[in-house]
Amino acid sequence: MGDSTATTCTGTTKRGTPCQNPALPGEAWCWWHHPDKADARKLARSKGGKARHGRRLGDVGQGEYIEIGELGDVVGVLERELNALLSLEKSISRARAVGYLASVLSSIYKDSELEQRLAALEAQAGTGR
């Protein structure tokens, strides 16, 4: 048989129904409703928001301006973002983003190679731009 001394929290949910969580030992409320735990709950919510699943604060929105003047600039940006993604915790979202950026980089390299070959053919034919 289980411990029959465990009590249920006397708090009320946002919907107005009785809380079903077990009360803290020797208390009438659970951790979520105990009036003395308000600061601890606030701190826990703050830490949870700052964690952001492996992202570090300050990595985003630094006001960095990047001028794209040629294809190499685009490749540089994509490579930098790909490396930033790889530094994050493994997840399905990360895998999708890495796959997408790798696909875009692959397309750029193919297009660049075709452009170079076309320019070489045009130079041979004397019809260069």
Image (spheres, rainbow, N blue to C red):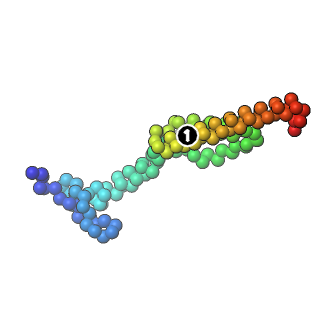
Q: Quadrant of residue 119?
A: top right
Which image quadrant is residue 73 in?
A: top right
Q: Please give the name of the residue rendered at 55% of the width and 40% of the height, measured from the top-left corner.
A: 99
The answer to whether residue 121 is above or below residue 40 is above
Q: Is residue 9 left or right of residue 121?
A: left
Figure check: 43 above or below 124: below
Determine which residue is flagged by label 1: 99
Please name the residue shown 25% across and 58% down the image.
21
Residue nearest the observer in this picture, 68 or 51: 68
Residue 59 showing in the rendered view: no
- Return the residue nearer the eye: 114 or 74: 114
Q: Residue at x 52, y 43 (%)?
A: 96
Name the residue at the bottom extreme: 16
Percent coordinates x, y for residue 63 in the rendering: 64, 47
113 horizontally vs 51: left or right: right
Figure quadrant of residue 58: top right
Quadrant location of the C terminus?
top right
Question: What kind of element bears circle 1?
Answer: helix
Q: Position of residue 91 (x, y in %)?
A: 46, 42
Looking at the image, which residue sits at the far right?
126
Residue 5 location (% of width, % of height): 13, 56
Which residue occupies 66% across, 44% down?
64
* Amino acid on which disc 1 is placed: Gly
Considering every residue shown, the one lying at the far left of the view is: 1
